[in-house]
Image: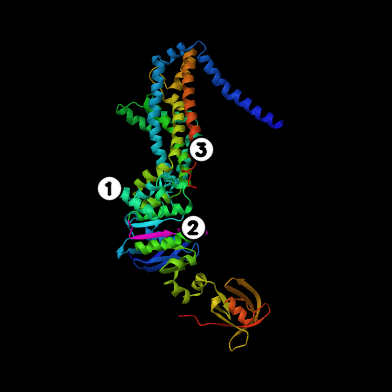
Amino acid sequence: MGKHALRYSVLLYLAALLVAPVVMVGYRTFEHGFSPVWDALSSHDAVSALKLSLLITVIAVPINIVFGVTTGWLLARRRMPLPWLVDALINLPFAMSPVVVGLAVFVLYSRTGWIGTYLFSHGIPVLFTWKAMTIATIFVSLPFVVREVVPVLEELGTEQEQAAAVLGASQLQAFFRVTLPAIRWAVVYGTILTVARSLGEYGAVNIVSSNVVGQTLTLPLYVNNRVNQLDPQAAYSAGLLLAVLSLLILVGMTTFSSRRRQPEAAE
Amino acid sequence: MSITVRDVSKSFGDFHALVDVSVDIEAGHLTAVLGPSGGGKSTLLRIIAGLETADRGHVEIDGVDVTNVPARQRGIGFVFQHYAAFTHMTVWENVAFGLKIQKAPKDRIKTRVAELLSLVHLDGFASRYPAELSGGQRQRMALARALAVEPGLLLLDEPFGALDVKVRQELRDWLRRLHDEVHTTTIFVTHDQEEAMEIADRIIVVNHGRIEQAGRPEELYDRPANDFVMGFLGPVTRLGGQLVRPHDIQVSTKATAGAQHATLERVVSLGFETRIVAAPADGAEPVTVQLTRNQVHELDLGVGSDVYLTALARAS
């Protein structure tokens, strides 16, 4: 009996805390049928927010994949100078509140900031545009690929790379033909996490955005804006769209989570 | 390809893997680098391959100094103890890898890979993945992969170390036959003296980062340079303070000049061979002697018998 009580109370807790709110959003969204949802999502402002979210993600994710795989390889193969420092720095976005990240980007790119001074004098506005929002997003989603790739590379070892080398492969050839295919599931998993974080980021982008509806609002910022403007139908609809995207990401994560830890089962 | 290693030293932190090692390896031979684990034999092989850089000294292949030539330009084949199979590639793709890197024409790759797969008896396994092969099959695939680029030198690092006894014996015989057919200069590392004695033309004994002795197997067995080589290459026992082979001791039941008086403690019958253990009268450690069953019968030996032991002069 005690065992069952424990199981069901945990289920109940999860249902109350996680499932109920999401179901509630779904219910509220479709309370008045499909057409208000469609109208809300096809409005100029909502489409603009979705487009901006996708634009930022499409830029941030590839940059973090290339950086993450390269850094991960250098760390795992002990070729990184000051590895302990780099390792700690990569965890910084995990440890730091996104608001502080946003603030840091704000300070750096403002008219009096180190980079901002230069950019403003050359007439290149970055702060309060999608560019600063992208920089903030890259910052907060930076650790995911590195963290997924390093343990798999360590598990993989260097023998396959050495075998490729004696067969005449250059270091680049060995990497692209042998190493990368062997760690591909870890890269895919890290990418999914990066996409999720990039689409959902709120705190960091909020600070460096000019928050102009229809121009510099991402989907999460747009949801917040609609809540403040007492426009519940638009808020619920955009919120549900974000939830559906997360659900797709969740499906992807479940599919790849069992494969990612092995560098392709060898035994 | 002939290889010359001159005054090579290599340390890993405080550990001296190789200390001023010099050795010549003749072209066309099957050479074994034999020694206990941690003795530096794998390091020597990896330095010849270019997978490890020597701290000091140099390596020549066919008289050309290759000390600073990267592994991929040395024209060698290397077989790893744990196969180092490319896990995401099929057997066919594994074997074809080196040829693809060389950008060999497609039809040549096809014929060459087919040739090699039949050489290593993996004809029907081309589209399998390494995970679907047994250990022995994986190592044969690794051999085919190494041979695909027609290396002038084949290096094998404990190639059969991870396999069970039966498969090991098979692959051992097979490697010897392969070498007799292809004549590629081959060096393999092993800690198994039987394996080295059985298939190698030359043996290099490495211990504590130094070369103890190099030569033909029977030379090393009959005229070991020191007690370590003697002990490592075959069974030994101590008689009158001297290290001798158990089959190089004469047993008599009558006292003779210079013979060691001993009492028989144990008689172990191993089929054709019988091993006896005798305790010397002077209290030294027990001596093991290897006899045939007939000798034991003729001498009428049993536990408690008085025997007189003499070391036979070493055959030379």
Q: Which mark is residue B314?
A: none
Q: Residues within 10 Å of mark 3 (few under 14, many from 20)?
A: few
Q: Is residue B195 visible?
A: yes
Please, what is the three-letter code of the amino acid marked with disc 2?
Val
Could you tell me which chain the residue with mark 2 belongs to? B
Locate the C terminus of chain B and report the quarter of the image it occupies: bottom left
Please, what is the three-letter code of the amino acid marked with disc 1?
Pro
Disc 2 target residue: B167
Q: What is the total number of numbered labels drawn onto the structure image?
A: 3
Could you tell me which chain the residue with mark 3 belongs to? A
The answer to whether tags 3 and 1 share a subunit is: no
For the residues bearing labels 2 and 1, Cβ distance under 8 angstroms? no
Is residue B162 magenta-colored?
Answer: yes
Q: Residues within 10 Å of mark 2 (few under 14, many from 20)?
A: few
Q: Quadrant of residue B257?
A: bottom right
Disc 1 target residue: B105
For the residues bearing labels 3 and 1, Cβ distance under 8 angstroms? no
Mark 2 or 3: the one toward you: 2
Is residue B206 magenta-colored?
Answer: no
Stretch in magenta: B150-168
The answer to whether tags 2 and 3 share a subunit is: no
Question: Which residue is at a point 33% across and 29% down the rendered structure image?
Answer: A119
The answer to whether tags 2 and 1 share a subunit is: yes
Mark 2 or 1: the one toward you: 2
x then y, percent, for residue A37 = 46, 14
Disc 3 target residue: A258
Q: Quadrant of residue A117?
A: top left
Question: Which residue is at a point 45% across and 11% down the rendered structure image?
Answer: A35
